[in-house]
Image (tube, rainbow, N blue to C red):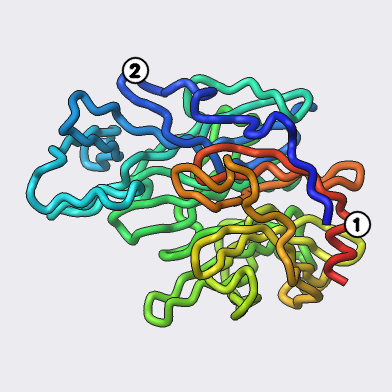
Amino acid sequence: MKVTRSVKNPIIAPKDVKPSREDFEVVCVFNCGVIRFQGKVLLMLRVAERPKARHGNEVRTVFYDHIQEKITVKSFEKDMPGIGLHDSRYIYTPERIYLSSMSHFRLATSTNGIDFDIDEQPCMEAANVYEMYGIEDPRITKIGDDYWVNYSACSTIGGVTTCLAVTRDFKNFERKGVMFTPDNKDVAIFPEKIHGKYYALNRPISAEYKLKDIWISESPDIEAWGNHRFLISTREGYWDDGRIGCSAVPFRTEAGWLEIYHGASKDNVYCLGAVLLDLEEPWKVISRSENPIMLPEEDYEINGFFGNVIFNCGVLVEEGIVKIYYGAADTYIGYAEVALQDILDDLK
């Protein structure tokens, strides 16, 4: 399958994003939702920031203090007893585990889909107890005049949940609260009703059996979800034998609903593939990629904050081209194109 990456990749890097506070630094910009809005390509960027260390033996983190209702910085000495810094994503302390950075959402717009103007301040950031450690991986579904944004929220209360917000102008966001209970993430809402009901893909995690599979759920109103059904699992010996999760918002084709999903091997190489679902009964799988559409190949996809990762939260499908905006190595945003017919032919 021919995948064409932009010659300007990565199209957005941490250096391109202004920190939201003077004493912060942007560590990563990745995993963006995408939509056409007012004639422009709009990305909702996941921006991960952390407070700058003030001396060589200091490590600092940031979180939302729901008691004081404000974003708070906490400092540690690197040689303090019981501290663990072996994983760049976390700060382990005897008290609790902190994330080494906190993510918020930032808007970026473009007329050509490659060169983006990036807002200097967040459009959404942590604001309640379920979002204590930040908000991550937004996905945008347009239904009527509303743009529904679902996202992962991280907290010591419950762990990872999926939350929901709605907007019409990308300036004012109405939070609808927790959409799926912990631990459930990688949610994508279908862009239209099917026989009077809304549907969403999601990825619950079984702590007891260590399962990370994609399920499908239905709703009468987008806010309350039920009738949860298993959809697909990992596959032994394939590129997605470690874990899977939905990535882009599903889109309609003549052959079925097409979902671009991510899968990781057991050695944590993240790739993108596709699954085709029945148009009338989307819990029925028609076909699924045997080989990935995209896999980490370029330096910026292989080396970064967490390497060997291609992770996608949205696509645009225009004039027969699937336009993929993706997180690369949990550090950058890349852009690639692939012909829709190539994906469908591969699924046959």
CA separation in Å, label 1 and label 2: 47 Å
Residue carrying label 2: 22
Residue carrying label 1: 341
Give, as a three-letter code, the residue at label 1. Gln
Quadrant position of the C terminus in the picture: bottom right
Give, as a three-letter code, the residue at label 2. Glu
Residue found at x 54% / y 36%: 173
215 with respect to 120 (left or right): right
60 with respect to 324 (left or right): left
Name the foreground residue: 140 vs 238: 238
Count the marks.
2
Q: Position of residue 80 (x, y in %)?
A: 9, 44
The label nearer to you, 1 versus 2, is: 1
Quadrant position of the N terminus in the picture: bottom right
- Pointer 1 or 2: first along the chain: 2
Name the foreground residue: 28 vs 176: 28
Rendered view: 63 above or below 155: above
Mark 2, residues whose alpha carbon is within 10 Å: few (<14), some, or many (≥20)? few
